Image: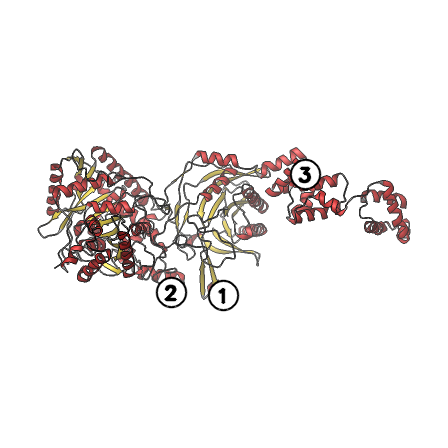
Amino acid sequence: MSSAPWEVVIGMEIHVQPTTRSKMFCGCAIGELGDPPNSNVCEICLGMPGTLPVINKAAVEACLKTALALHCEIPRHTKFDRKNYMYPDLPKGYQISQYDLPLSKNGILELDGRRVRIRRVHLEEDTGKLIHAGDKLYRALESFVDLNRAGTPLMEIVSEPDLRSADEARDYAVALRTLLRTIGASEAEMEKGQLRAEPNISIRRAGSEELGVKTELKNINSFRALHRAILYEVVRQTELLESGGAVVQETRGWSEAEGRTFSQRSKEFAEDYRYFPEPDLPPLEIDPVWIAELRLALPELPGARRGRLTSDYGLPGADALLIAADRDLADLFDGAVAAGADAKHVANWIIGEVAPTGKIPTAEHLADLVKHVTSGSITRDQAREVLMESVETGRAPSDIVTEHGYSQLSDEAAVMAEVEAVMEANPRAVEDYRAGKKQAIGALMADLKKRAPQANKKVAMEILVRLLG
Amino acid sequence: MSESANLTELTIKETARLLRLRSFSAAELVTAHVEQIERVDNRVKAFLRFTPELWEKQAEEADRRISRGDLGPLVGIPMAVKDVLCVRGVETTAGSRILSGFKPPYTGTAVSRLFAAGAVMLGVTNCDEFAMGSSTENSAYHPTHNPWDLDRVPGGSSGGSAAAVAAGEAMIALGTDTGGSIRQPAALCGVVGMKPTYGRVSRYGLIAFASSLDQIGPFTRSVEDAAIVLDAMAGHDPLDATSSTRQNDVLRDFDAGVKGMRLGVPREYYDVEGIEPAVKAAIDAAIKSLRDAGAEIVDVTLPHTDYGLAAYYIIAPAECSSNLARFDGVRYGFNQDGQNITESCERTRRKGFGTEVRRRVMLGTYALSSGYYDAYYLKAQKVRTLIKRDFDAAFEKCDAIISATSPTVAFPIGAKTQDPLSMYLCDVLTLGGNLAGLPGISLPCGMTDEVLPVGLQVLAPQWREDVGLRVARAYEVASGVKAGVAPLV
């Protein structure tokens, strides 16, 4: 009896906090993670009797930009709805969200040539936070409510079940973050809770059209955890089905410490949210002129940029991806190339030196530095030091080079004199090399670097090999 | 004593003139009202709480303004505020145990605007719990008595505010109207009560019953006073997204009369089931009086009236079930402890809410539940649209609609408490105005033989408070019927 292999089906619900100064429905500032509890609150986000919500235009704008970047349809009419459920972190006893008329729908995110369909992008408000005294919830004697986060705007981005592996799901989330950062809609830092991914996972036999029973995963705090959690859940479901069991439709939590998912809430106990139109907010009419303005103001999106870096400059795919994925790096690249530096060298310096440190020079300074390197007027080691100093002091690389008297000795006769001096000072190493211990050349090069750091190493190596041979 | 009795029977207009003539001070005016409260409120029980710290400060400020020559009509005017309007630092409970001890950290927009205009707050008035009721008997604290017959109800839900004005305890009072909660008690207490167009007055600070229906409005002793108070409260508020920027000058053509105006009498309202003969007779006389004043009386029809009550009792409970979800005992008000949060919340709500509130929360929860939403809530919204269209069609044939406000006069305390449906029928002539968002006024149109007031309702098209007030004013002038203060001997 042979069955078709299992196929993994994943849809993603991603909550993103758009970049705004104030909350979704009141004037409270968006606080920082370490703020004292209940310090960024007012009568509105506390849900005091008699208060009313007013829509934050900046949040709508961020959501519209996101929708445009995801090629969504934006209907003229949209509205907010109440999602009713009671929990102490939800001050009004309902969350203002969007139900049947979201701000946008039917979009696409390009992922390595694949198109992941976006079902909808809508706006809602975040809840507060409960803090339980004690190590376990059921043993907690006291619980505290912190409503700093309550009323913070959230965009919910829902994909169709188009993802087929944990890798794809992670790549989707990363690509979405890149997109959001590029268009300035969100900082999308997972560690700060600005991006929260909830994958819906099911498996089915390849070739089947029907979807299997799905589980939804929560408590995922990093891209790595997203990947691990899905891998675990796929194995769990596969083993369950292959041993004759059945997957239960439920919400499961990911435990980072234990490396497994656990049941949180099954569908039998699922709430009836009793959605109905929010009577405190009139329906929203989106002005097409506003949409057009936002569309025109969108920067080049990462997918397009990556393609351009490959086709216009011949950068390898991986390099283009790395640079295009970060708006700051991509702008640095374009700027340095525009300032006349060689594209491939610029890319190498960005990937090798700038990206790992996160210290970003100006495009002019990077171009200046790369020109020194390509002309051979300073060594790579010197160039690294110049870059560091330039980023720290903000001074131009050329000035630093001049001040330190950095230069590179490339003239063959001059380098030969240095090499001869090194050989003279290390007769033992010379002997060893000639006796067949080829690694002895390392000691000679190291001494050369000490005696004559400005010597062009490529040239020196050639001479050394020739003289030793 | 007789002089102070006089001060408590004045209108805003009369008072403003006398304050400027320095016939008495704002402080003396407040004292006269406080004395009247001391004399009658143990019988009327219009108030839940008093605010001496506010009235002392505000009366003092009013006298300073008057001495500076401030001519604002509301400077120094003694006001009572329904227990659903938040005032900073003043216990506000919506007539419910669940909010006992709750002192809002902010003042709502309508009250703020009246404070800024110089009104002096005397205290907080009784009402049906969360404004749900038509007799003020659903208050968690005590019933209020009708000043014209202490054995009868003042109507509701804003019964305390209506009774306070009728008993001379306050010159003006604020109420809220979701299905008739200003107009019906105004009718039963023989004062003027007005519900503005939905969106005319900011709801910020109004403890919500049904958000799409609630409006704040005034109780006064004359139509002109209602216009003055409305004028001070009305207008867009950045804190209420449903408040409108539309302008309407209610005072400009206020006295222009009804000559040449067409007034519609909807047959469904005129012949409403259960209308008392004495009420009908008073309305007939009012129609005649308006016709004599030059109005053309036309028959109009509101064919979906019969469905209005049913739609209202789906929509209002649905919204209230959501609006009242926040009362969980966690952050403010009454709390009952439990083994865990769910039990604590359940106990808090079971003990904190009264019977009628629990009934409506359950009705509304049911109506919004999955599988029932389409059959109830959605259907009710469609009926609401049909009712709006009824009014649109009627207003093509007339400038304003007139009817009785309530099919009955004030009924004895306890008469309807065991029969919720008969209580719901009190609003049958008023709730259409809420469903359609129209401005409506109730004003006195005479007394029955038992000396119980009858109210005439004037409904105007959306945003045309000026039209409604003009018709009401014309009737007031033509009939000579005035809102009087009950004798309470």
Q: Earlier in the sequence, mark 3 or mark 1?
A: 1
Q: Residue furthest left?
A: B449
Secondary element under disc 1, as helix, strand or loop, is loop
| Quarter occupied by the C terminus of chain A | top right
Q: Amino acid at mark 3?
A: Pro
Q: Quadrant of residue A413?
A: top right
Picture colour scheme: secondary structure
Classify mark 3: residues with Cα within 10 Å, few (<14), some (14-19) or many (20+): few
Q: Please name the residue that numbered disc 2 is placed on.
A: B338
Q: Position of residue B199 (x, y in %)?
A: 31, 43
Q: Please name the residue that numbered disc 3 is placed on.
A: A316
- Horizontal side, residue B114 vs residue B283: left or right: right
Relative depth, front residue between B155 and B109: B109
Q: Position of residue A298 (x, y in %)?
A: 53, 37
Q: CA distance from mark 3 to mark 1?
A: 53 Å
Q: Which mark is residue A134?
A: 1
Classify mark 1: residues with Cα within 10 Å, few (<14), some (14-19) or many (20+): few
- State if disc 1 and disc 2 touch (CB < 8 Å): no
- Please check whether the numbered discs 2 and 1 fall on a single chain: no
Relative depth, front residue between B458 and A118: B458
Q: CA distance from mark 2 to mark 1?
A: 19 Å
Residue B20 showing in the rendered view: yes
Label 1: chain? Answer: A
* Picture layout, residue A461 above or below residue A41: above
Q: Quadrant of residue A380?
A: top right
Q: Position of residue A81 (x, y in %)?
A: 39, 45
Q: Position of residue B196 (x, y in %)?
A: 26, 44
Q: Amino acid at mark 2?
A: Gly
Q: Amino acid at mark 1?
A: Gly
Q: CA distance from mark 2 to mark 3?
A: 64 Å
